[in-house]
Amino acid sequence: MPRIVRRVRGALRAEWRCLALVARRQLRERGLLGVWLAPAASLAMICLHELQQFPASDRVVRLVGEVRADQPLWVSLLRTPVSVLVPTRDQPVWGGLPRLVLSLGLAQLLLGPRRALLVGYGATLAGTLGARVMVAIGPDHFAGVPTAYAHDVDTGASAAVVGLFTCLSVRLRAPVLCLAFVVPTVVGSVLEPNLAGREHLVAVACVAACAVFQERRRPGEFRKPGLPAPSGPPEAPGPPGPLRSSRGPTRPTARG
């Protein structure tokens, strides 16, 4: 078998053990409480989607969760936590729920709930602030965007989802996860350079940089083997003692 095939098989096996087996073990130990973030976020997104269908409640959703680059900064910062759960109006809410559930579920099981929330919110905030900077730069610079983009509504969990998958890919060294969920988002953002795509690129870059920094400080912090580890370090072998039988130490006997 070629060496590269063996390496790919070994990498896939190691990633499977690190992700699927450890996640299943954590889920078996913690139960449904171990993934409470995923159903809670999904339920909140579905409820907000239903509220968007009625004019009166839609005004409330816009008031508490609509973020734009032309708003005062403090308004955007106050609305950003809610904007993560407000579905994007031009996309079906059901299309993004599987990715949201998978990213939050894996992140909570493998990274912990607080870190999962921090990464998701940090990725969203990085994209939101990045959009304001790109609008301020203007279209004359390669990193800028047209000023008309300042009126675009910035809601949805896509930046949080791609940020969580980026963090998992780096901290767990999971290239298949990166190829499946991060690379398509990056490629789509490059091919369709709108404001949302630029925000995704900013979120991926910021989360990847922070994850690499943390991985260098604490290498292997979240990479656990798929099988339970021994309870303590192996004991060092002691000096050889006398041979023993079932009756005790054996001693040489004198010949009579």
Image: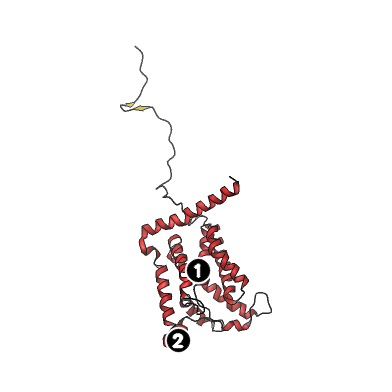
Pointer 2: what residue? 59
- The residue sitting at 36% across, 61% down in the picture is 31
Residue type at the position of mark 1: Val
Residue 195, visible in the rendered structure = yes
Residue 115, visible in the rendered structure = no
Image position of 45 with respect to 172: above or below:
below
User: For this view, does 105 lie left or right of residue 216?
Assistant: left
Q: Nearer the viewer, residue 55 or 172?
A: 55
Q: Quadrant of residue 40?
A: bottom left
Quadrant location, the N terminus: top right
- The residue sitting at 54% across, 52% down in the picture is 11
**Residue 244 % position (x, y):** 35, 28
Question: How is the rendered protein coloured?
Answer: secondary structure
Quadrant location, the C terminus: top left
Q: Nearer the viewer, residue 213 or 180?
A: 180
Neighbour tally class for label 1: few under 14, some 14-19, many 20 plus, Cα within 10 Å: many
Q: Nearer the viewer, residue 249 or 208?
A: 208
User: For this view, does 178 lie left or right of residue 117?
Assistant: right
**Residue 56 % position (x, y):** 42, 88
Q: Secondary structure at mark 2?
A: helix
Q: Quadrant of residue 243?
A: top left
Q: Residue furthest right?
A: 140
Pointer 1: what residue? 161
Q: Mark 1–mark 2 contact, CB under 8 Å?
A: no
- The residue sitting at 64% across, 81% down in the picture is 146
**Residue 21 % position (x, y):** 44, 54
How far apart marks 1 and 2 lie (CA) works out to 26 Å
Looking at marks 1 and 2 on the same chain, the residue that comes earlier in the sequence is marked by: 2
Residue type at the position of mark 2: Arg
Image position of 56 with respect to 39: above or below:
below
